[in-house]
Each structure stands twice: as C-alpha cells, then as structure tokens.
Image: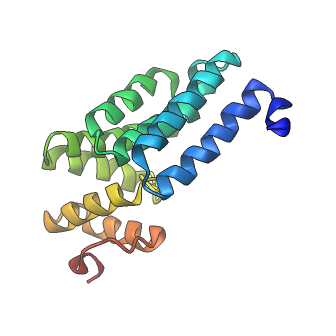
Amino acid sequence: EALAAQLSLTEMARFGLLATRVLTLQQRWPEAIARAEAALQLAHQAGLHGGHARTFEVRVAMALAGAGRHGEAAARLEALDPLLLGMQRQLNMAIAGVLRHRAAGGDAAALARALSAAREASFHTLLQAVPPVIARICDEALALDIESAFVRELIVHQVCATFSDHALV
C-alpha cells in the first residue's frame, strides 16, 4: 500500500492493465471487467483520452468478450475506429468483426470478412488475450471452411489447447 501511494494516476492505470491481463488469463471475467473499467477511469483522470486511452478501451473490450458480451465488446472497439489509421484500424475492425460474428449467433459472412482482413494483415495474435473466444472462433471457422489455412496458422501461433480435435488436422 505504501508503494501504491507513490504511484501516479497513469502508473496506477497501467498497473490496472496488468491486473486485468492476469484476471483474463484466469478467466475471472467479472473481476477482469471491473478492473479494466477502473483502469480506464484512472487513465481518464490522468488525462489520457482518445488514442492515448485506446489500450485501456481494448482491455475492457477483451474482458467483455471473455465474459460472452461480444456485442458490447465489438461496439467498444468500433467506437475507436475514428481514432485509428491504416493497419491499426484494419486490426481493430478484424477483432470487432469476429466479435460481431459471435454476437450475431454465427454470421458466417461477418466471420469470413473479419478473418480475411486478419489474414491480409498477418494478424496472428487475433484475440490472443481471450483464448476461449479465439478457440471457439477457430472451431467455427474450420467447421465452415472459412479461411482454414489462416485459422490453422492462428492455432499454431497461439498454441491454444482448447481447440476441437478437427482444428489440428
């Protein structure tokens, strides 16, 4: 506590990002969401807004995605779109697209568009922060034969152990 009292608001916010990452790896979604939102609030209090708060917004979105709140997560990412340019925008929209697919209950066209954008950008860390979500997406994509070669690359790069047996064939 004595050490925490010496931290600036920005440092406390960044510590909140680390704590959020640990909670997401532990799949403690309600706590991860609360910690991510608290870190975002601290970032705002520290004067970080817009593009400077993007990392904090993304952490909130990833925690929401892990909790199965895919539509909310996608909306948060889509709200960042005006702040992003080029490759950042493409990667952000790929993440939002796969989350929209999940929120829509399996919109194959949305999944195909999102995975195609991820493939074009060689985005092998797609949703790496939430392994259960990317595992389900990869399973669905393989079952629907959407971007199968790229999806297998995702699996190899992310070394997710939660994929179905057919995903590794």
Nearer to the camera, 84 or 7: 7
Left or right for 97, reference 124: left
Residue drawn 28% across the image and 40% down it: 70
Q: How is the image coloured?
A: rainbow
Q: Position of residue 129 (x, y in %)?
A: 48, 53
Residue drawn 64% across the image and 24% down it: 42
Query: Is the residue 36 above or below the residue 126 in the image?
Result: above
Q: Position of residue 162 (x, y in %)?
A: 33, 71
Left or right for 166, reference 59: left
Left or right for 1, reference 55: right
Nearer to the camera, 116 or 83: 83
Q: Quadrant of the N terminus?
A: top right
Query: Is the residue 89 above or below the residue 81 in the image?
Result: below
Query: Is the residue 130 above or below the residue 60 in the image?
Result: below
Q: Position of residue 145 (x, y in %)?
A: 16, 66
What is the quadrant of residue 40 in the picture? top right
Residue 7 visible in the current orientation = yes
Q: Quadrant of the C terminus?
A: bottom left
Query: Is the residue 148 above or below the residue 119 in the image?
Result: below
Nearer to the camera, 60 or 111: 60
Nearer to the camera, 157 or 135: 135
Q: Position of residue 136 (x, y in %)?
A: 26, 60
Residue drawn 55% across the image and 44% down it: 20
